[in-house]
Image (tube, rainbow, N blue to C red):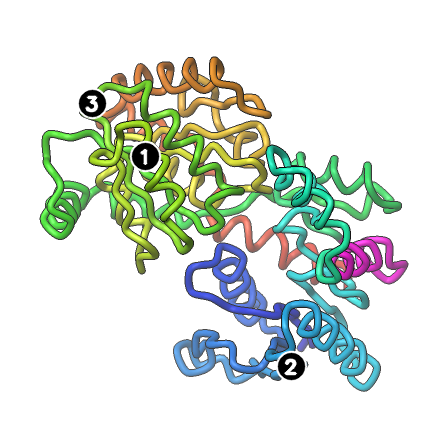
């Protein structure tokens, strides 16, 4: 039985990285591995052992969670280092950038590029503060140390975009990097499509929405990075029948003010975080994520798997699996007013060919069938086990 340490500092039920982590842990357990999950104290991970009877799963709380962002990061990194010196594993798989890992998934991209794109459009004072932040300096330090570690055997990137970033920024042998796009529960979204009308009716009633409207869906926390302001700005170029549904955790107030200023307040609906947010795809005529930076958006992939066309940007790794003009629209960054307007107009045309056509919806859905989660996970598990055989 192979003994694997799995490192993920935090858990939230709404996170894409957390969902991937749970599924990957399950895949290693199903392959007969013994897994030790190293995580911060107080994280409410699903009871995988109780739910599936995986006796070979151990969860070890490590580090401190109450020291502020920088202190928590230092505490976790040092605790991991001490633990790995005292315990032996055949593979150490990390979702976070932690030195000492033998295998790592860069699902969150690189922090250096994240900061670069995040600061676009910010005032000079905010841009000057970023390099002074202890937390960000630590993140950059641990990122570099983890990627350039001689002990790293494999780095999994979820897009070619992230691979290019890493090979440009850091010293790492290209043969250590393997691109495995994010996976999606393809079968489950087929069930959603089959139940679409019933779910749509239920959600319309819950939120008191008109069945005569057409809906674009935006989901994701971190509204600034995900480009919610551009989604709202783009709504002014669409017919009045189009409404925007916003799901995610964050402060809505500045976006409500923007919607009011543009005369769009009645057409923008803020629902906050929702369990089972994917069900809102049953309402959606289109999915919109004009993101500043997203290594590979799970939400966009889920939309495609549900037969919903997607509008996003070329700074989203998921753009690599979108067929421009056929399954979605890809905008070039940095976004400009004219390109946003043309993109929204093109999106309306694409939606017009898809919304009332089950065959077109199935065509979009079939375009990502090869990214079924089971295949995706098996690729990674098989590669790790082959390297430690």
Camera-side residue: 77 or 119?
119
Badge 2 density bin: few <14, some 14–19, many ≥20, Cα 10 Å = some
Is 71 situated above or below 365?
below
* Marks 1/2: CA–CA distance: 41 Å
Q: Name the quadrant of the N terminus.
A: bottom right
Q: Can you give x and y, in whole percent of width and height, for residue 76 in the image?
A: 70, 75
The residue that appears at 73% across and 57% down in the rendered structure is 133
Camera-side residue: 328 or 259?
259
Whether residue 35 can be seen here: no
Image quarter of residue 327: top left
Residue wearing tag 2:
64
Badge 3 density bin: few <14, some 14–19, many ≥20, Cα 10 Å = few
Q: Earlier in the sequence, mark 1 or mark 2?
A: 2
Is 389 situated above or below 328?
below
Q: Does the magenta stretch include residue 145?
A: yes
Identify the mark at residue 240; answer none if there is no mark. Answer: 3
Label 1, secondary structure: give it: helix
* Marks 3/2: CA–CA distance: 51 Å
The part of the chain drawn in magenta is 137-154
Whether residue 50 can be seen here: yes
Identify the mark at residue 259; answer none if there is no mark. Answer: 1
Q: Earlier in the sequence, mark 3 or mark 2?
A: 2
The residue that appears at 25% across and 46% down in the rendered structure is 192
Q: Which of marks 1 and 3 is nearer the N terminus?
A: 3
Label 3, secondary structure: give it: loop
Is 118 situated above or below 80?
above
Q: Can you give x and y, in whole percent of width and height, for residue 277 in the image?
A: 32, 52
Image quarter of residue 388: bottom right
């Amino acid at each position: 039985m192979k003994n694997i340490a799995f490192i993920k500092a935090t858990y939230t039920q709404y996170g894409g990285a957390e969902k991937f982590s749970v599924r990957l842990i399950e895949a290693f357990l199903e392959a007969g591995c013994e897994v030790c999950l190293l995580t911060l104290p107080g994280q409410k991970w699903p009871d995988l052992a109780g739910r599936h009877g995986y006796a070979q799963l151990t969860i070890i709380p490590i580090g401190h969670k109450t020291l502020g962002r920088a202190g928590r990061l230092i505490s976790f990194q040092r605790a991991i280092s001490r633990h790995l010196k005292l315990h032996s594993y055949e593979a150490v798989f990390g979702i976070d950038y932690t030195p000492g890992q033998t295998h790592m998934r860069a699902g969150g991209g690189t922090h250096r590029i994240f900061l670069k794109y995040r600061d676009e459009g910010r005032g000079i004072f905010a841009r000057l503060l970023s390099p002074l932040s202890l937390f960000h300096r630590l993140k950059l330090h641990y990122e570099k140390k983890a990627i350039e570690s001689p002990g790293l055997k494999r780095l999994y990137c979820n897009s070619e975009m992230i691979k290019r970033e890493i090979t440009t920024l850091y010293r790492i042998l290209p043969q250590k990097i393997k691109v495995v796009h994010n996976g999606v529960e393809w079968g489950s979204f087929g069930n959603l499509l089959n139940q679409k009308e019933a779910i749509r009716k239920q959600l319309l009633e819950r939120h008191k929405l008109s069945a005569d409207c057409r809906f674009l869906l935006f989901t994701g926390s971190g509204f600034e990075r995900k480009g919610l302001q551009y989604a709202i700005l783009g709504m002014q170029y669409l017919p009045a029948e189009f409404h925007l549904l916003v799901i995610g955790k964050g402060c809505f107030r500045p976006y409500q003010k923007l919607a009011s200023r543009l005369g769009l307040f009645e057409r923008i609906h803020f629902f906050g975080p929702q369990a089972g947010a994917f069900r809102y795809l049953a309402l959606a005529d289109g999915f919109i994520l004009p993101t500043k930076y997203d290594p590979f958006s799970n939400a966009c992939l889920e939309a495609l798997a549900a037969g919903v066309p997607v509008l996003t940007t070329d700074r989203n790794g998921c753009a690599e699996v979108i067929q421009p003009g056929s399954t979605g629209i890809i905008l070039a960054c940095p976004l400009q007013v004219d390109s946003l307007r043309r993109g929204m107009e093109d999106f309306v045309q694409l939606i017009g060919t898809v919304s009332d056509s089950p065959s077109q919806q199935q065509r979009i859905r079939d375009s990502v069938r090869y990214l079924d989660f089971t295949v995706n996970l098996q690729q990674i598990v098989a590669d790790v086990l082959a390297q430690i055989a």
